[in-house]
Image (cartoon, rainbow, N blue to C red):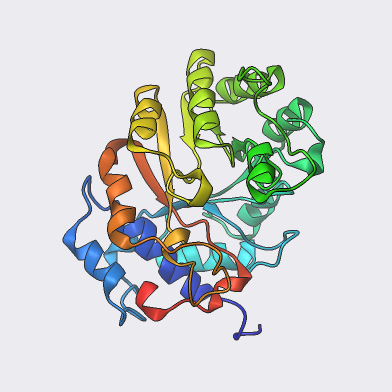
Amino acid sequence: MDTDNKISRRDFIRTSVSAGGALLASTTIPGQAMELLQDPKNDTKFANDELLKGVCDIHLHCRPDSRERSVDEYGFMEDAMAAGYCAVMFKSNDFSCHDRAYIIRQALPGAECFGSFCMNRVHGDRVNVFAAQKAVETSGSLCRCIWMPTLDAAYQYQSEGRKEKGIPVQDDSGQVLPEVVKVMEICAEADIIFATGHSSPEESTTLVRKAHEVGVKRIVVTHANSSIWTMTPDQIRQCIDLGAYMEYCYLPCLWGEGTKMSQYQRQSIEDFASFVRIDPTRSFISTDLGQAVMKQIGRAHV
């Protein structure tokens, strides 16, 4: 492994723990967690730490993938189990990973790993209902989340100023598209997560409202604290009132100046915590990590 360009599995585990394990150890941000996050000397503190017991991360990117990743799914799961994680759900923007989770479980008895499925262009130019149905029917029933378009979302393309059109979730009048509603119905029947993906804050609010009407029990607003997807407190409360869970990713606390993702502004720990505090009972933290370009992270932010 080229250590100049890739974050190690050990660093990945340690950073994941500080995000997911520490910040939601109680229904408020505990003082101990804030100390762990802000202390630049936390290179080995997380070994055999009771804080690791029961940690779940349901948004991380590993190999194999169509983008370079810092770790592979099997190796990460080995380390996560050794660290005391409860469960992991892998995410690939282009490919299924619930089928690989099935194999990993056979190779690692006791591994609580799951997969998810993103509605991106590799499955067509529209949200693909057939692909969603097959995902939930795959052996093992390990597809536990269907994300609306992420890197190929219409809002993402528009925000990047691209000429081509991304995959829409609404029509021109702002109504949720029929194929999206059908995917919501699939998620409701299978009792798995329907996640808003890279939809705009306004689109996400509309999607949550429709998913609530459809009867989806597990609705997640994806990285509501991140970059162009950042929601206002009012939007967050609207979604929570409709039964959604808010996902806050730790990645924005790591990117920015001094990293290879310098185009994004780094989020302070205090600002990050302020999102969780809006309603800790309907919030969870994931890492959104796995980017091979994130090796140049300042130690004070790991």
Q: Is residue 42 above or below residue 19?
A: below
The residue lying at 78 percent from left, 45 percent from top is 163
Residue 192 seen in the figure = no
Q: Nearer the viewer, residue 34 or 190?
A: 34
- The count of marks equals 0
Can you say which quadrant of the picture contains the N terminus? Answer: bottom right
Based on the displayed image, in which of its 4 quarters is residue 269 positioned? bottom left
The residue lying at 69 percent from left, 44 percent from top is 157
Based on the displayed image, in which of its 4 quarters is residue 64 positioned? bottom right
Can you say which quadrant of the picture contains the C terminus? Answer: bottom left
> At which x and y percent is residue 148?
63, 35
- In the image, taking residue 121 as reference, residue 113 lies left or right, namely left
Q: Is residue 93 above or below residue 133?
A: below
Residue 281 seen in the figure = yes
Q: Nearer the viewer, residue 89 or 266?
A: 266
Based on the displayed image, in which of its 4 quarters is residue 185 positioned? top right
- In the image, taking residue 118 as reference, residue 235 lies left or right, namely left
- In the image, taking residue 99 as reference, residue 21 lies left or right, namely left
The residue lying at 60 percent from left, 68 percent from top is 75
Return the residue found at the far left. 31
> At which x and y percent is residue 66?
76, 59
> At which x and y percent is residue 181?
64, 19
